[in-house]
Amino acid sequence: MLSDSEWAQVARDLLHGAGVVSRGDKGGSRWVAIRHADDHIHIAVVLVRQDTGRRFWPHRDYPKLRAAAREIEQQLGLTLTAAADGTAARAPVRGEVEKAARRGQVPARPELVRAVTAAAVTAHDVSSFEAALRSAGYLVEVRYGPSGDALGYKVARPGDRTAAGYPVYYSGSKLAVDLSMPRLQQRWAGVSGAAAASADVLAEARYGVDRGRRAVAGARNGRLDVDADEIAHATQDVLMAVCGFELAGRDLGAAADRFERAARIPDRRVGEPSGASTGLRWAARQLIRHRRVLRQDEVAAGVALAVALAALLQEIAAWQRERGRVHQAAAAEASGEAVRNWTSAWPPPTLSTPLSQLTGVDHAPGAREPRTRTGRERGSRQPRV
């Protein structure tokens, strides 16, 4: 709980940080702070200067306000809120929430984000993307230019209609920044062609996950010049691909949902593809064709992949934390915990072989460095990209 004097200083710091009323500006706007509760205040500002009587428009006041708020939170030891870095999910508006509540459904926007993300993982071009959405039961329309190039798309949930009976469409850019048509085409450019069948998909996917973990560790230590944020974004594809895997009645769906915040690249920046990120996307497209309950002979390989994935998520969480992205780091840690909980169903009590010998990775939480076997030890080769 803050005192009145502390709240007064908070109000002055916020207005100065947002560029609305600068300190020492005698002719600045008039403002008032009202405290009618223990835990917050309201600030009202007249956006007309006292000295000139002219109306003014603050420039980028919201991002500046968020930065000022975070500084105050650090100074006063308060809970650190998120930065205005463009990684927060687009929340459903009030009308969407109330409409979904009346129908006993979840709001359309989060459902469409998951559906479009899953379609983007399995697709390799616009036509396969459109086909994946249609096969999942969603309405989709792609907008083409005079040259025949795809310019954009919009998607709707079946049965979600306006009062006039028209489908309620959402464009990809309104669902998420990285789901716009240009961003999807950039994602597919590095992994062209349909995914080919492989006799050892789980082992090849584990190789790609291990490679991604080593790349993030190298970026943290300054040994590799790779875009770790792009690798985190590609890791979301792998989580979407394995969320259908089941073991002892559990699946990995919760891990993909929790990691979503950590996967978004800050400030709406376009990631820089690398061999590690491209390998992860290729592995995801291979895995998504095997979204089913793991066969008995696949359990060990599936757990090995999950252990490697948990190590990658731990490395991404450390990367985010070192850059002061506490919310992204928390999302990666929660996702890693969900993956570890999934693997806790293995080994069964009758199995005497240590898991580290089956997977080549130390399963103990907090292990210093997972050990990766060579291609000859795995009996698999590096997937061609």
Image: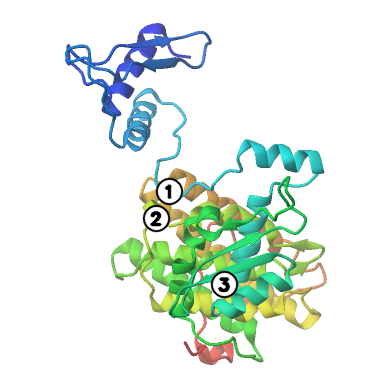
Q: Nearer the viewer, residue 92 or 69?
A: 92
Q: From the viewer's perspective, is residue 33 above or below residue 186?
A: above
Q: Badge 1 is on which residue?
A: 86
Q: Badge 3 is on which residue?
A: 361
Residue 134 image-quadrant placement: bottom right
Q: x and y percent of residue 322 in the render?
A: 37, 50
Labels 1 & 2 near each other (Cβ < 8 A): yes
Q: From the viewer's perspective, is residue 248 above or below residue 327?
A: below
Q: Is residue 42 left or right of residue 202?
A: left
Q: Is residue 132 left or right of residue 43?
A: right
Point out the tag, 2 or 3, that comes first from the N-terminus.
2
Q: Nearer the viewer, residue 268 or 1?
A: 268
Q: Badge 2 is on which residue?
A: 268
- Which residue is drawn at the image coordinates 64% and 66% (left, top)? 140
Q: x and y percent of residue 376 in the render?
A: 53, 92
Residue 136 image-quadrant placement: bottom right
Point out the tag, 1 or 2, that comes first from the N-terminus.
1
Residue 224 image-quadrant placement: bottom left
Determine the secondary structure under disc 2.
helix
On the question of residue 184 being in view, the answer is yes
Labels 2 & 3 near each other (Cβ < 8 A): no
